[in-house]
Amino acid sequence: MNPVLDAIYSRRSVRDFMNRPVEREKILEVIRAGTWAPSGLNNQPWRFAIVTDPGLKGRFEGLTHYGNVISSARVLIPVFLDKRAMYNIVKDHQAVGACIQNMLLAAHAMGLGAVWLGEILRSAEDVRDLLGLSSDFELMAVVAMGYPEHKDRTSTRNSVKEVIIFDK
Amino acid sequence: MNPVLDAIYSRRSVRDFMNRPVEREKILEVIRAGTWAPSGLNNQPWRFAIVTDPGLKGRFEGLTHYGNVISSARVLIPVFLDKRAMYNIVKDHQAVGACIQNMLLAAHAMGLGAVWLGEILRSAEDVRDLLGLSSDFELMAVVAMGYPEHKDRTSTRNSVKEVIIFDK
């Protein structure tokens, strides 16, 4: 099978991680993959934080309903929108989504597991404060990452037929 | 090199296409790849139109500054958000961005070229009218696709160092 299609179809949200650190080069490669997403006018509005320090990471646990995922993950990559780089709110949010998808696929392709945490957006200001960032940066998601515990992970999608609303 | 990373880094926006039709199975595979993006609560808010009819496709040309791209492309896939499936506007726009990135990567992996057209959003209502769709569907982008004309396509990105705003 085509390895890119295979990655797209076999990627799953991973929420249980091994007690094994993630190599620095792999963390940077995941971010690099994110930056190669397309963006309107190539404005590249995304910015990234890297959190591996256990004490700091622990302070994220209380900011989301999914503290157990944070606890298990070895790396957090909070993804931000730089408001100074924005040009269109819809397109910038889409671009960040494309960026995060690249990150998830890159992690999966390197044998890592990752999950896109969105619920933590309710604590966006706390995350920003924790990292000492200015209000120029708006939290878009946190990617939690590590080497996956081996287990079956299934998911489902609507069929292609169900999502095609016009065809001519 | 890792084929997934290679696809992420070698994909380019393609705006010049061969006069060669795109196989139906490949069009459906691109859409299927889109549907395997993650979305908040797995709400899968994306919907797709397929436009290959030359007469109908021609009517898109006047709706964007990039009519020449529409003219050259063999397939248009207008991507919509189904408002009835939405749960959070930011996360839904991000999910659609992730979906479109999957589509672009899948097209590239199958030897196709594609470009994410966003400027056409200024004609979102005209596109909806052209396809006879209800106002439940909000245009998010048009993916224009075909077999790429062979030419060098370069692009640039900020370095990883420039986009990391916190590291501990």
Image: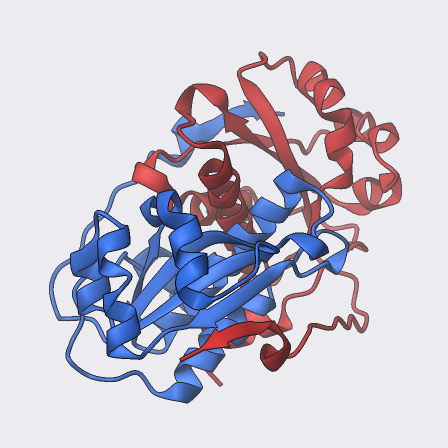
Chain colours: A blue, B red
Relative placement, left or right, of B16 versus B130 is right
Residue at x 30%, y 69% (from the top left corner): A145
Residue A111 image position (x, y, % from top left)? 30, 77
* In this view, B103 is above or below A4: above
Residue A160 image position (x, y, % from top left)? 41, 35
Residue A126 image position (x, y, % from top left)? 38, 54
Quarter of the image with the C terminus of chain A in it: top right
- Is residue B155 in view? yes
Q: Nearer the viewer, residue B21 or B122?
A: B122
Relative placement, left or right, of B162 versus A62 is right
* In this view, B33 is above or below A15: above
How many dots with numbers? 0
Residue at x 37%, y 62% (from the top left corner): A143
Residue B69 image position (x, y, % from top left)? 82, 46
Q: Nearer the viewer, residue A7 or A45?
A: A45
> Quadrant of residue A24 in the image?
bottom left
Q: Nearer the viewer, residue A128 or B37?
A: A128
> Quadrant of residue B24 in the image?
top right
> Quadrant of residue A147 in the image?
bottom left
Q: Residue furthest left?
A: A151
- Is residue B3 in view? no
Relative placement, left or right, of A116 versus B130 is left
Quarter of the image with the N terminus of chain A in it: bottom left
Residue at x 49%, y 63% (from the top left corner): A102
